[in-house]
Amino acid sequence: MIITQTPIRISFFGGGTDFRECFQEEGGCVLSSAIDKYIYVIIKGRFDNKIRVGYTRTEMVDSVDEVQHELVRECLRRTGIARQVEISTMADIPSQGSGLGSSSTVTVGLLNAMYAYQGTPRDLATLAREACEIEIDVLGKPAGIQDQYIAAYGGQRFLEFHPDGRVDVEDIGMEADVSRLLNRRLMLFYTNITRRSESVLEEQVKRINDRRSVLRQMKAQARQARLYLQSGDLDSFGALLHEGWLLKKQLASRISNPMIDEAYAAARQAGALGGKIAGAGGGGFLLIYCPPERQMDVRMALRHLPELPFHLERDGSKVIFNCRR
């Protein structure tokens, strides 16, 4: 039996520049962090030749081609596992529509578990690259590539995407005390809205050429935000989050909606300096930056929304149990 633990993420700046349609022309970069909420993948052998897959439903099939869970199916194909296996996934958060990169986290966790099950572990770069290939090239999802890399590597990262396809994964370079202070200033609230990210991202991809100037500003913000974190200027980081949210809303029509705008405005009026919808937008989790002394006011203003306490995570995808016989 193999169990992997893979973190989900919050993306601070640069989301949208990680689409191939963007970075293959003029590069892209994002500032992102793993958090201590995870997706677990369990894989074990079976006596019979069946494939059993357990998630929000249970599948029992005779061949890989019959598996309905598309990420499990394509990871089985990629790793060459064809029968006599049982796979289960469990998540700390809603598994769809959260805006926290859960689909890519599942893919990275599945690949890590399957390769470990075969006794042929892969490095983090390979896990991230193959997860991108499965989601974008095989399944044709309108997706960027930051989620797969932050899920694999973990930590607080500055990711740079080059036109030739290279991805540089760099630690942000925060001092430990700055990281702790940043964590105290970040809050996550669930909007109670779930949505398919594809519905937002398809429009965003179509509008990339029309939004090049906005995307360039978002890249510049990612670089500036990294400097703020390196110098410990956290409130400037928080204020920049607000400017980034104003830019992000220009990328597609359904990134925000009246409910999200109202909640965000209430948080700002209560003392938050900035924030954004996590991920593609349209629902999921609302990220807020707020000084600690004003956080109770923000909680009161958003008392209709469940809060998700969290911490920034250092580790990426890893095997936490390995019993191969």
Image (cartoon, rainbow, N blue to C red):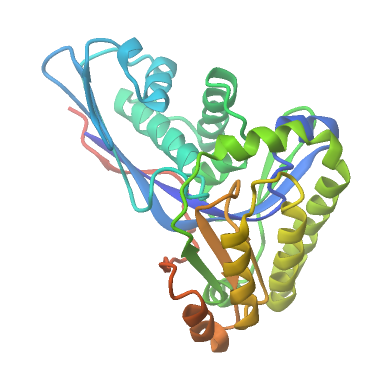
Name the residue at the left extreme. 47
Q: Position of residue 122 (x, y in %)?
A: 46, 30
Work out whether residue 66 can be spotted.
yes
Residue 2, picture quadrant:
top left
61 relative to 123, above or below: above
Instruction: Specify whether 83 is left or right of 256.
Output: left
Instruction: Specify whether 236 is left or right of 8.
Output: right
Tell which of 283 and 157 is nearer to you: 283
Tell which of 114 and 100 is nearer to you: 100
Work out whether residue 166 can be spotted.
no
Q: Position of residue 287 (x, y in %)?
A: 56, 64
The residue depicted at 49 percent of the width and 38 percent of the height is 104
Tell which of 292 and 3 is nearer to you: 292
Residue 4, picture quadrant:
top left
Quadrant including the C terminus: top left
The residue depicted at 32 percent of the width and 23 percent of the height is 118
28 relative to 257, above or below: above
Quadrant including the N terminus: top left
Residue 74, picture quadrant:
top left
The residue depicted at 44 percent of the width and 50 percent of the height is 7
133 relative to 261, above or below: above
Q: Position of residue 268 (x, y in %)?
A: 64, 76
